[in-house]
Amino acid sequence: MAIINPPNLEVRQLKGLHLYHAGLSSCSQRVRVALEEKGLPWESHVIDIANDEHVTSDYPTINPKGVVPTLVHDGVVHIESADILAYIDKTFDGPSLNAGNPAETHYWVERCDEQQYALKVTSHEFLFKLKARKSPEALARFKRLQQHNPGLVEFHEMFSSKNGLPKKLIQDSVARIMADTSALDQQLANQPYIAGKHFSIADAAWMISAHRYALMGFPTRRFPNYSQWFARMRQRKSYRGALQNWEPKGAIRAMGIYTAYRRMTGTDFCAFIPA
Ligand SMILES: N[C@@H](CCC(=O)N[C@@H](CS)C(=O)NCC(=O)O)C(=O)O
């Protein structure tokens, strides 16, 4: 369980549930889905990642890694979204989000977590590329302020460089996503949810990734069980309430246009799928 004792003393005085998060952050989205599925009230603290608020504000005194989400529950600070999902389910009343097969739930949450880097690479390449590259000045400031997360600094340096993300990295990320989706498709062959008959935190985690990949023009229909499962996920109240309602509409529209452009120019997600 990822509990930390950050230097920020004010958050330790907070009562109830507080989420530090961002609208388009996939790790934040899955936590919001779990909170909504549990029917829990929580207080929102939006961190504007696009404008580097996660490094320029006092947020690193709450989460020294300078990433979202952070959940504060009665003054105790939790980081790592997969751990937060398990914590929410275990700690609070409400519908169980692990009522099927706990070992399967755990396996699939972990597998989704291990795919985080591939999701980051593909999101930046296929959706955020025009907007999220940092100017040399912004990159220098990011490097100066982001002291505790060298991997993230390295990623943004690579992404904002003249050549962008290496082709091989994009290809490997797409291959991984295709392989994981194929495994998920088989897992869903005889059951409505990832870990059996009931919605679980594994579904909360994967529905976010499925949504993200759909924005990139992922070939969902190649995977019939996965496709039907995703259609069911899109019907859930939490899909609209915890995911879509927090995504900036203008940004989603711009991503739609960019995805269409990448498709037209033969440089979209599908163009990187291994033969
Ligand atoms: N393993 C962490 C990853 C957190 C993470 O990387 N969050 C992203 C948003 S999904 C972030 O804050 N990125 C900041 C950046 O790219 O500068 C978790 O699951 O909570």
Image: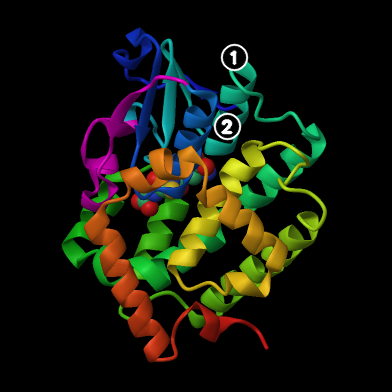
- From the viewer's perspective, is residue 219 above or below residue 86? below
Where is residue 81? Give x, y as percent.
53, 37
Q: Which residue is mark 2?
A: 85
Which residue sits at x=28%, y=47%? Answer: 49
Numbered disc in front, either 1 or 2: 1
Left-right relation of 148 to 106? left
Where is residue 44? Give x, y as percent.
31, 28
Q: Which residue is mark 1?
A: 93
Q: What is the magenta range?
A: 40-60
**Residue 154 counted in the magenta span:** no
**Residue 46 counted in the magenta span:** yes
The answer to whether the beta carbon of the residue marked 1 is less than 8 Å from any atom of ligand 1 is no
Which residue sits at x=69%, y=50%? Answer: 111
Nearer to us in this view, 42 or 118: 42
Left-right relation of 185 to 76? right
Q: Amino acid at mark 1?
A: Asp
Where is residue 101? Give x, y as percent.
81, 35
In the rendered view of the protein, which quadrant contains the N terminus? top right
- From the viewer's perspective, is residue 14 above or below residue 191? above
How many labels sit on residues? 2
Mark yes or no: residue 130 visible: yes
Mark 2 is surrounded, within 10 Å at the Cα level, by few (under 14), some (14 to 19) or many (20 or more) other residues, namely many
Circle 2 — which element? helix
Way the structure is coloured: rainbow
Where is residue 17? Give x, y as percent.
41, 18
Nearer to us in this view, 72 or 85: 85
